[in-house]
Amino acid sequence: MAKDAGREKSSRIRSVERAIDLLQALNRRPLSTINDLHRETGLPKPSIVRLLRTLEAKGLVAQSSSYGTYQLLGRVKTLSSGFHHEPQIIEVAEEIMIDFTKREGWPLALALFDLNAMVVRASSIPYTSLSLFHSSLNMRLSMVSRALGRAYLAHSTPNEQKIILEIVKHSGDPEDEPARNEEAMGRMIAQVRARGYATRSSMIEPKSSTIAVPVRENGRVVACLGFTWITAAMPLQKAVDQYLPHILSTSEAITAELEHRSPQLREPCHFPFIEAEADLSSVA
């Protein structure tokens, strides 16, 4: 038995174990320093640097514009592309969204927060011809320029807003440029909260328009629901007057269905690095 255990241990590839430990540590916060990774993994700093260089070469990690910090890139999601278990909210939302589109004609999208953007995880586009896209699944949308991102940001807690904006400030995406203007972000957030819905920047994809509202679980925003139409079909105010009550009731129906699910079966959206009380000095 001892010999078998020894052979099993010796057959492990230590470099692979270290790489997995490092990826898991990087996933716990939006930005990590070498000291953070050393403290959490116990790996020697020279080993961490070599592993980071390897992960950078594979397009999984990048050094942030904030000196000395590292972050995961969207390509890291390819490591889970064969894992198809979805959060409970997607299963709950899809049927409700499809019913809406079959009734109203226009498509809906459900997006979840992911590191520095909203990612479309469910869409009713396949159930309508009134869309400029064949699919919007897995699209990454700016937190500060897109309706779904603005809705999530505005309805997050003040602490979450600070963290998200700090992350997005370091983005190289031109759509995230407004995040650097704190006054403009404050006005946008206040406007969205006052209206109860968000719209996308008029400078982005003007052929279509979107209204987005939050979806809540246990009183907390966990996703956003977006209603998109072809701009030439109707002006914004008409879309708001005609469809906003139905969009809000659809969001409420998703929330109600989530509340009816057994707590043992429910798997709410969970973003540990956002939920923790963050020390923003580490990403300043």
Image (cartoon, rainbow, N blue to C red):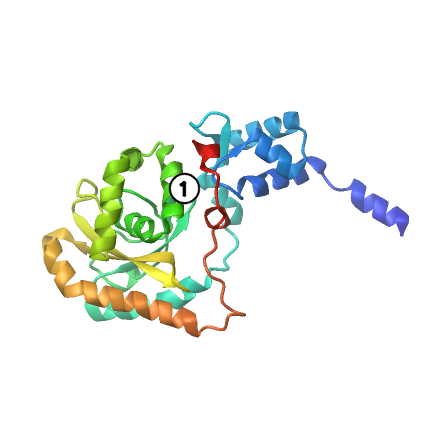
The x, y position of residue 190, in whole percent, is 24, 48
Instruction: Give the residue at x 77% y 42%.
Output: 11
Position of residue 134 in the picture relative to residue 221 (left or right)? left
The x, y position of residue 121, in whole percent, is 38, 55
Instruction: Give the residue at x 28% y 64%.
Output: 127
Position of residue 36 in the picture relative to residue 282 (left or right)? right
Viewer-proximal residue among 280 and 79: 280
Determine which residue is flagged by label 1.
163
Q: How many marks?
A: 1
Viewer-proximal residue among 51 and 269: 269
One can see residue 147 in this view: yes
Residue kind at label 1, given as amino acid type: Ile
Quadrant showing the C terminus: top left
The x, y position of residue 123, in whole percent, is 32, 59
* Element under disc 1: helix
Density class for disc 1 (Cα within 10 Å; few <14, some 14-19, many ≥20) is some
One can see residue 199 in this view: no
Instruction: Give the residue at x 35% y 31%.
Output: 172
Instruction: Give the residue at x 30% y 33%.
Output: 180
Residue 16, located in which quarter of the rendered image?
top right
Is 211 situated above or below 38? Answer: below
Is 87 situated above or below 180? Answer: below
The x, y position of residue 41, in whole percent, is 65, 38
